Image: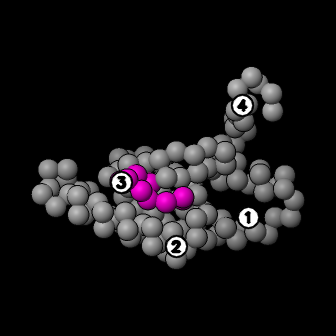
């Protein structure tokens, strides 16, 4: 399984900028090599991992997507990025769009509590 692992970089470090820039370049190359879908992200803080799809690392932030939400995570918080190849294989086997949507909701951790936000005005 493909994985990137990082140690904490102290903001007071005199080479912080260069280290973060290298981290950003490594992540972008990792995304290019392994695709954008199905990753598990762990952060420097203790807590559960995030299951996301990666967009890119830019401006010292990791841009990511879940089922219908786009967001970013500061690169300084990223401890590890791991490709979830098994989840990707399981997803590709599913035949219907509804089954794929349900799988993505489950994999992203949304489950039954997932709420789709309507656009402004409330009309889908």
Labelled disc at residue 119: 4
The boundaries of the magenta stretch are 54-62
Local packing at callout 1 (Cα closer than 10 Å; few below 14, some 14-19, many 20+) is some
Asked if marks 3 and 4 touch (Cβ < 8 Å), the reply is no
Task: Give above or below for 70 relative to 38.
Answer: above
Residue linked to disc 3: 60
Labelled disc at residue 5: none
Q: CA distance from mark 4 to mark 1?
A: 28 Å
Majority secondary structure in the magenta region:
strand
Residue linked to disc 1: 91
Give the quarter of the image for residue 92: bottom right
Local packing at callout 4 (Cα closer than 10 Å; few below 14, some 14-19, many 20+) is few
**Coloring applied to the structure:** one colour
Q: CA distance from mark 3 to mark 4?
A: 30 Å
Residue 106 seen by the camera: no
Ranked by sequence position, the earlier of labels 4 and 2 is: 2
Residue linked to disc 2: 32
Ranked by sequence position, the earlier of labels 3 and 4 is: 3
Task: Report helix, strand or loop for mark 4.
Answer: loop
Relative image position of residue 104 (x, y in whole percent): 70, 53
- 91 sits left or right of 60 in the view: right
Instruction: Check residue 60 for magenta coloring.
Output: yes
Task: Give above or below for 93 relative to 72.
Answer: below
């Amino acid at each position: 399984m493909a994985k990137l692992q990082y140690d904490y970089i102290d903001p007071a470090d005199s080479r912080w900028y260069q280290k973060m820039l290298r981290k950003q370049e490594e992540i972008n190359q990792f995304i290019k090599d392994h695709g954008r879908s199905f990753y598990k992200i762990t952060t420097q803080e203790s807590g559960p991992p995030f299951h996301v799809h990666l967009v890119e690392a830019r401006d010292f932030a990791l841009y990511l997507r879940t089922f219908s939400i786009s967001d970013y995570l500061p690169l300084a918080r990223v401890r590890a990025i791991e490709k979830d190849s098994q989840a990707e294989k399981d997803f590709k086997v599913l035949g219907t769009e509804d089954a794929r949507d349900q799988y993505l909701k489950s994999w992203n951790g949304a489950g039954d509590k997932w709420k789709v936000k309507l656009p402004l005005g409330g009309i889908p």
